[in-house]
Image: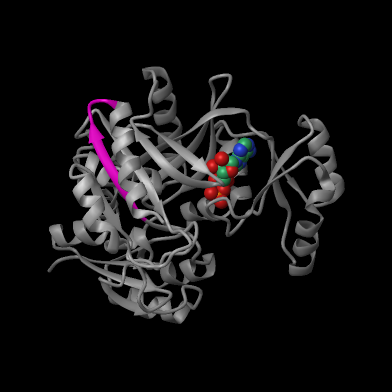
Amino acid sequence: MSPTVGVIGGGQLARMMVPPAVALGIELRVFAETHGASAALAATTVGDYRDAPAVLAFAEEVDVVTFDHEHVPQAVLAALVDRGVAVRPGPHALAFAQDKLAMRKRLTELAVPVPEWAAVASITDLEAFISEHGGSAVLKTPRGGYDGKGVRVVRDATEAVDWFERADSTGGGPILAEELVPFRRELSQVLARRASGETVLWPVVESIQRDGVCVETIAPAPDSAARLAGVAADIALTIAERLDVTGVLAVELFHTTDDRLLVNELAMRPHNSGHWTIDGSTTSQFEQHLRAILDLPLGATGCRDPWSVMVNVLGGPASGRLSDRYPTAFADQPTVKFHSYDKESRPGRKVGHVTAGGDDLEETVFRARAAAAFLED
Ligand code: ADP
């Protein structure tokens, strides 16, 4: 009998697990928030991931539960574990991808380099932090932020009055304050770890963000000397092992102007910075995630081309389907691989991506950007 994997969340990450599941004869079922979700091409149950009985009923029909997002509450995860469900990654690891304050605290304990940070509970705390950190701070809501939502740069504590008021009225705890890191670029180290411990890494990649959203990745990161790549790998391996992560782990890093690497964010699931692996690596992050959570030997992570460039396709003001633009896009860029998430286009929403591979970085970037531009409004 083929194993059955249940994915909580029906977004594009669950969707992109479908092709490797089909190839390997793994049955994939999705617990999605709505009908017509991006991953609805797999067998789908519609429900609320905060509803423990509904999630338990879904989990009873599968061998392993995994995730498309990190928002499932710990109480629901604990109910699954109590019922004997294999939850991968486990709640003890996921806690650090769910709460940025808990993550900063744990990584500091593990001596993993992070930006200077503090938990601030009041305007006075924040004023002190700002004056000790060169007159600015990056504020983050510990939970629920994504794509830069829940991140605000402030130069004066009064700019955060609304956040403290909301935290007071909702009984929320302290806010995370960080130094504004002077970085030259952002990198991401993606790896996969099996339940029994085997770990493999893809090369560290550069990720280019606009307004807090990843728009492009270059694999491997240009100008990444062996030393830099080695430090990124060591940091990610330490995190995977010490937090006991199962499945794919993405570690987002700042490469600072004084040549240090600091951890910004963790994701314990396939990640945008690993999408290039579908077309650019021997084993994609989606196949690897399935192998890892089923505790199967992991696949090779070599690159198919010297350079792989991934560009996200973001929705624009015009509605309409990506596929309406396929005739011109495909004709112009026959070497580029196109991916649609089958999502309704909304301004700024990630609705697809493209990946180009090649020997010459500049030319590969050009082809990937040109292909994405054909699909955008
Ligand atoms: P999210 O979880 O919403 O994606 P992040 O913490 O990754 O939020 O922050 C989004 C972006 O904001 C980062 O990719 C980076 O460009 C910028 N950023 C975040 N923290 C800092 C910081 N401490 N210093 C400088 N820039 C930051």
Residue depicted at 43% across the width and 22% down the height: 228
Q: Measuring from the top left, give residue 146's x and y in whole percent.
A: 54, 54
Of residue 350 and residue 88, the one placed in the foreground of this image is: 350
Q: Is residue 298 visible to the viewer in this orientation of the structure? A: no
Q: Relative to residue 109, is residue 124 drawn left or right?
A: right
Dominant secondary structure (helix, strand or loop) of the stretch shown in magenta: strand
Q: Where on the image, by quarter, is ligand 1?
A: top right
Of residue 145 and residue 25, the one placed in the foreground of this image is: 145
**Looking at the figure, which quarter contains the N terminus?**
bottom left
Q: Measuring from the top left, give residue 151's x and y in whole percent.
A: 64, 49
Locate residue 225: give its quadrant: top left
Q: Is residue 366 visible to the viewer in this orientation of the structure? A: yes
Q: Relative to residue 32, is residue 146 drawn left or right?
A: right
Q: How is the image coloured?
A: one colour
Of residue 270 and residue 373, the one placed in the foreground of this image is: 373
Residue depicted at 75% across the width and 36% down the height: 136
Q: Measuring from the top left, give residue 186's x and y in whole percent.
A: 49, 34
Q: Measuring from the top left, give residue 168's x and y in whole percent.
A: 79, 64
**Looking at the figure, which quarter contains the C terminus?**
bottom left
Q: Is residue 61 above or below residue 66?
A: below
Q: Is residue 6 above or below residue 260?
A: below
Q: Is residue 200 magenta?
A: no
Q: Relative to residue 145, is residue 116 drawn left or right?
A: right
Q: How many marks?
A: 0
Residue depicted at 36% across the width and 51% down the height: 270
Q: Which residues are magenta?
A: 352-360
Q: Relative to residue 24, is residue 322 drawn left or right?
A: right
Residue depicted at 76% across the width and 31% down the height: 133
Q: Is residue 294 above or below residue 132?
A: below
